[in-house]
């Protein structure tokens, strides 16, 4: 008999999980509380979540705790994931964002969870489409200029994005909003231009 | 009903990034609730956050991280509470769980009620009611102020606002809104906790709220 502990160690895999695989695995967690699927999701997302929060300026301990808490909420809220609405990484991003924001975190405790659960057996088509969308977004981000990419990243990584963008790019604060507008317009163009 | 006025991209991006304060977040949610176009725009911004997350180089976790998480999986589930409908049933669903204070007269056909968010007691959120065909005195705004029209509407130098519309204003706006023939009910929030500048800040001080 295999040791359950051994089965549950995140397996070494060389390639990161693609978006469709992420969505399928979250579906398995929702449907069967599948710990093997969770282990693969943990292996992919937990180190990236920690990296994301370190990048946003959190301490190692705080980033680690947020990464772990996000994975716990992924487990508990898996039934609410709907690949027809958002990609898996996008859904995980919104969970971790809400944990990082103090008022949103307090609200999770008081949360009015009136939303219906998503259909746990998400259609193969929805999973495929969510993978396609993630691919398009990756392409759109890659098509940005270095400065535009920086504006977008700072919008997500900085607590006071406007001030951070102004400092990083040596811009007056008044110019920052128009730079954000330009970067977003470019991102939108790239999204529209992709097949 | 067609929505003409939306939050700016900058506001939606900050919402997506979790960088809006609790009050501005709530008022933005009130708009998202009725506006499919902004839900789609927000979806794009959140997908950007998802792509950035997915592209991060993996960081080293604590050696016991996975075991620690497994040990915590079976803890208390996320609380599921029945929704508490707002006291007044024609209030938007996002106000569920909020405490709506008593209505104060601000004079000249304007009434005001402070909204308390239990998860963010410092948030500065309010309901405003302007009687039919009344003008609000000319005023400027806080650094960032969001106003979602719930019922009725108003006009000012920037256009005509109806139910579902959002006014996304900063401190460069000086205006004098005129309520339309139906009057106007709106939900508003200001940047920063308990900001005392701007016209609403002055009224709040006068009422002894802050
Ligand atoms: Zn809108």
Image (tube, rainbow, N blue to C red):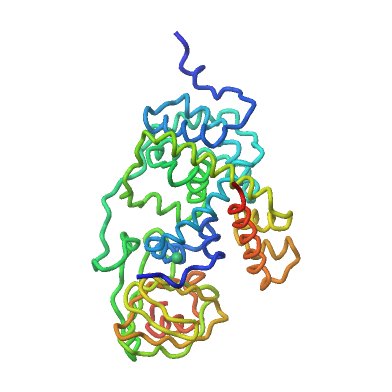
- Residue A51 lies, in percent from the top left, at 63, 42
Query: Quick check: can you spot residue B96?
Result: yes
- Residue B105 lies, in percent from the top left, at 31, 85
Image check: B166 left or right of A186?
A: left
Q: Image quadrant of residue B3?
A: bottom left
How many numbered dots are placed on residues in this image? Answer: 0
Q: Residue at x 40, y 50 (%)?
A: A108
Image check: B70 left or right of A135?
A: left
Residue closest to the far right: A170
Above-or-below relation of A135 to B147:
above
The residue lying toward the viewer, choosing from A195 and A171, is A195
Query: Quick check: can you spot residue A66?
Result: no
Above-or-below relation of A151 to B109:
above
Question: In which quadrant of this rendering is ligand 1 seen?
Answer: bottom left
Above-or-below relation of B193 to A13:
below
Q: Residue at x 44, y 47 (%)?
A: A85
Above-or-below relation of A195 to B162:
above
- Residue A20 lies, in percent from the top left, at 51, 35
- Residue A96 lies, in percent from the top left, at 51, 46
Q: What is the quadrant of the N terminus of chain A in the image?
A: top left
Residue closest to the far front: A195
Q: Image quadrant of residue A180?
A: bottom right
The residue lying toward the viewer, choosing from B23 and B206, is B23
Q: Residue at x 57, y 50 (%)?
A: B49
The residue lying toward the viewer, choosing from A151 and A51, is A151
């Amino acid at each position: 008999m295999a040791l359950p502990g051994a089965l549950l160690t995140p397996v070494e895999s060389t390639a990161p999980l693609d978006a469709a695989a992420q969505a399928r695995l979250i579906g398995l967690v929702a449907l069967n509380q599948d710990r093997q699927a969770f282990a693969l999701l943990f292996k992919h997302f937990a180190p990236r979540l920690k990296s994301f929060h370190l990048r946003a300026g959190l301490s190692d301990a705080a980033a680690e705790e947020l990464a772990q808490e996000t994975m716990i909420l992924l487990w508990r809220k898996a039934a609410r994931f709907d690949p027809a609405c958002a990609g898996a990484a996008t859904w995980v991003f919104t969970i971790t964002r809400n944990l990082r924001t103090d008022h949103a975190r307090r609200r999770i405790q008081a949360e009015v969870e009136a939303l219906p659960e998503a259909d746990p057996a998400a259609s193969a088509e929805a999973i495929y489409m969510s993978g396609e969308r993630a691919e398009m977004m990756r392409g759109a981000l890659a098509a940005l200029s270095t400065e535009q990419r920086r504006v977008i990243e700072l919008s997500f990584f900085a607590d006071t994005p406007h001030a951070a963008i102004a400092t990083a790019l040596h811009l007056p604060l008044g110019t920052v909003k128009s730079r954000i507008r330009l970067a977003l317009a470019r991102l939108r163009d790239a999204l529209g231009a992709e097949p | 009903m067609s929505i003409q006025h939306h939050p700016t991209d900058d506001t939606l991006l900050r919402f997506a990034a979790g960088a809006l304060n609790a009050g501005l977040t709530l008022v933005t949610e009130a708009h998202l609730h009725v506006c499919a176009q902004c839900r789609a725009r927000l979806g794009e911004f959140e997908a950007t956050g998802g792509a950035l997350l997915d592209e991060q180089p993996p960081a080293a976790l604590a050696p016991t991280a996975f075991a620690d998480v497994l040990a915590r999986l079976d803890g208390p589930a996320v609380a599921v509470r029945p929704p508490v409908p707002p006291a007044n049933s024609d209030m938007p669903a996002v106000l569920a769980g909020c405490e709506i204070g008593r209505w104060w007269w601000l004079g000249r056909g304007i009434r005001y009620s402070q909204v308390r968010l239990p998860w963010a007691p410092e948030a500065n959120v309010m309901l405003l009611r302007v009687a039919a065909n009344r003008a609000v005195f000319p005023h400027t705004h806080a650094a960032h102020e969001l106003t979602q029209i719930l019922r009725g509407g108003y006009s000012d130098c920037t256009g005509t606002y109806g139910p579902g519309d959002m006014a996304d204003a900063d401190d460069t706006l000086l205006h004098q809104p005129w309520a339309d023939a139906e009057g106007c009910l709106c939900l508003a929030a200001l940047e920063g906790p308990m900001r005392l500048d701007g016209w609403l800040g002055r009224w709040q001080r006068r009422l002894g709220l802050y």
